[in-house]
C-alpha cells in the first residue's frame, strides 16, 4: 500500500513550498517506498527459502524411509546397501543443512526484518512533515488575509497573532523538512552496504553447504558405481533400453 503522500494529492498552488522542492522530496520518498516493497519481498522470499530447505530434507528422508521398508530392500542385498548409503548421506547432510538455514536466518531473515521495521518510522516522519506543511500553509493564508484588511485595532491584533503562529508553524515545518531531506538520501544510499553484507554471509554459507553436499554425494556415488564405469548418458541409454524391453513384455503390451 502506498505511503507516499505526494501520490494522493497535488501540491497546493499557494503552498509556501515551491513545486520544485516538493517534487525533489517526492522522488526521495518514492525511492524509499520502492525500497520498502523490495525489502519486504526479500524478507518473505528468504523465509520461504529456509522453509523449502526444511521441506526438502523431510521429503528426502521420507523417500529413504519408504524404500527401506519395501520388499525389494528386504530381498536384495545390493539395493539395501544403496539405500543405507543414501540414508547415511542424508544424516551427514542434515547437520550442514541446519547450519545453512541457521546462517540464512541470522544473516538475512533477521537483518531484513530489522531493516523493514524502520519504514513505519519513516512513514510517521513523512506524515508529520505533511501535517506541519498544511499548518504552515494555513497560517500563511491567515497572515495574508489580515494584511489585506483595514488596519483597525482588532485586525492589527489578529495580524500580530497570526504572524506569531506563522513563525511557530514555519519552525515546526523546517524541522521536519530538514530532517527528511538529510536522512532520506543517507538511508537510501546505505542500503547497498547493508544488503551486501547480508548477501555475502548467505553466499558463504551456501558455498560451504554445497561443497559438503558435493563431497558427501561424490562419496556415495563412488560406493554405488564401484561395479560400473558407465557415464550418466550411458546409464540413461541403459535404462531406456530396459524400459523398452519391459514394455515389450506380453503382460505390459497395449491391447
Image (cartoon, rainbow, N blue to C red):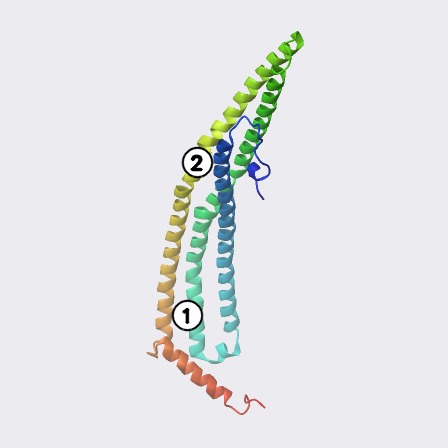
Q: Is residue 156 left or right of residue 125?
A: right
Give the residue at x 49% y 34%.
25
Precedes in sequence: disc 1 or disc 2: 1
Quadrant where the N terminus sits is top right
Q: Nearer the viewer, mark 1 or mark 2?
A: 2
Q: Depth check: 127 or 118 in front?
A: 127
Residue pushed farthest bottom?
A: 250
Residue pushed farthest right?
A: 154
Asked if 39 appears above or below 149 in the picture, the reply is below
Rounded to the nearest whole Å, what is the CA distance between mark 1 and mark 2? 56 Å
Give the residue at x 57% y 40%.
7
Asked if 56 appears above or below 227 in the picture, the reply is above
Give the residue at x 41% y 42%.
194
Q: Is residue 135 left or right of residue 93?
A: right
**Residue under pointer 1:** 85
Quadrant where the C terminus sits is bottom right
**Residue under pointer 2:** 185
Amino acid at each position: 500500500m502506498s505511503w507516499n503522500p505526494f501520490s494522493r494529492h497535488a501540491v497546493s498552488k499557494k503552498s509556501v513550498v515551491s513545486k520544485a522542492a516538493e517534487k525533489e522530496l517526492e522522488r526521495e520518498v518514492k525511492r524509499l517506498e520502492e525500497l520498502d516493497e523490495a525489502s519486504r519481498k526479500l524478507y518473505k522470499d528468504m523465509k520461504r527459502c529456509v522453509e523449502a530447505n526444511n521441506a526438502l530434507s523431510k521429503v528426502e528422508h521420507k523417500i529413504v524411509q519408504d524404500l527401506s521398508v519395501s520388499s525389494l530392500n528386504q530381498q536384495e542385498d545390493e539395493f539395501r546397501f544403496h539405500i543405507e548409503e543414501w540414508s547415511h548421506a542424508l544424516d551427514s547432510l542434515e547437520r550442514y543443512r541446519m547450519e545453512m538455514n541457521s546462517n540464512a536466518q541470522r544473516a538475512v531473515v533477521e537483518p531484513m526484518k530489522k531493516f523493514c521495521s524502520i519504514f513505519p518510522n519513516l512513514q510517521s516522519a513523512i506524515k508529520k512533515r505533511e501535517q506541519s506543511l498544511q499548518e504552515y500553509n494555513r497560517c500563511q493564508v491567515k497572515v495574508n488575509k489580515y494584511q489585506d484588511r483595514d488596519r483597525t485595532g482588532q485586525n492589527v491584533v489578529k495580524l500580530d497573532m497570526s504572524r506569531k503562529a506563522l513563525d511557530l508553524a514555519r519552525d515546526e515545518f523546517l524541522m521536519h523538512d530538514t530532517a527528511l531531506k538529510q536522512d532520506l538520501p543517507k538511508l537510501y544510499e546505505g542500503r547497498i552496504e547493508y544488503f551486501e553484507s547480508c548477501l555475502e554471509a548467505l553466499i558463504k554459507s551456501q558455498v560451504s553447504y554445497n561443497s559438503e553436499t558435493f563431497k558427501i554425494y561424490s562419496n556415495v556415488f563412488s560406493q554405488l558405481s564401484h561395479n560400473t564405469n558407465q557415464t550418466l548418458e550411458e546409464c540413461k541409454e541403459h535404462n531406456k533400453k530396459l524400459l523398452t524391453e519391459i514394455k515389450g513384455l506380453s503382460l505390459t503390451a497395449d491391447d
